Amino acid sequence: MSAGFPLVTVFIRPEDEPCVAAAIGGLLDTSTSRFEFATSPEDPSLRRQWAIEHPGVPVADRRCRVLWARFDESDAHRVAEAAIDVLSPHARAENEAILAGRDVHATPDEYPWYAHVPLWETVDAP
């Protein structure tokens, strides 16, 4: 097993970290000890995403954290998809709708995030 790889940077409250790790572990049928939230530099884009998607809702004690996973690198894509399925359960369906050429109305994320591992296919710009 590798020493680990970063999955996502997420804007999250400290008390939500164990629940998120447990939910991802549940999807993968693995121990939560394979996941670790680590300090991350503040990312203004995640704060902006929060402000846009949750107008008037205070940030509270949310902070930028990197979620690391201790898996073989060959599992990176599968593990990252599971993480996004927990953090943003609507993201996969929204991506599929975009690929199918349908209109998509983005659903606000409870945890603003960005992935460090490629997730799904994208549509090439015209």
Image: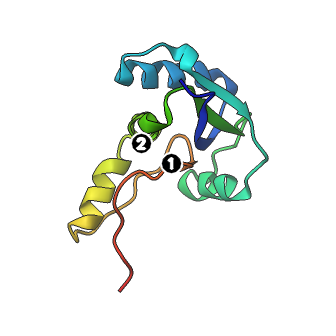
Question: Mark 2: which amino acid?
Answer: His
**Pointer 1 residue:** 117
**Residue 123 position in % (x across, y down):** 33, 71
Q: Is residue 55 above or below residue 33?
A: below
Indicate the quadrant containing the C terminus: top left, top right, bottom left or bottom right.
bottom left
**In-image side of 33 versus 25 (left or right):** right
As rendered, which of 82 and 52 lies closer to the eye?
Answer: 82
Q: Residues within 10 Å of mark 2 (few under 14, many from 20)?
A: some
Image-quadrant location for residue 66: top right
**Which residue appears at 47% of the width and 50% of the height?**
108
How far apart marks 2 and 1 lie (CA) works out to: 6 Å
**Which residue appears at 49% of the width and 46% of the height?**
109
| Sequence order check, earlier mark of 2 and 1 | 2
**Which residue appears at 72% of the width and 31% of the height?**
38
- The reply to whether callout 2 and callout 1 are in contact (CB within 8 Å) is yes
As rendered, which of 38 and 110 lies closer to the eye?
Answer: 38
* Number of numbered discs on residues: 2
**Residue 116 position in % (x across, y down):** 56, 49
**Which residue appears at 40% of the width and 52% of the height?**
107
Please give the label number shown on residue 6.
Answer: none
**In-image side of 105 versus 113 (left or right):** left
As rendered, which of 111 and 67 lies closer to the eye?
Answer: 67
Question: Mark 1: which amino acid?
Answer: Val
**Pointer 2 residue:** 77
Secondary structure beneath label 2: helix
Secondary structure beneath label 1: loop
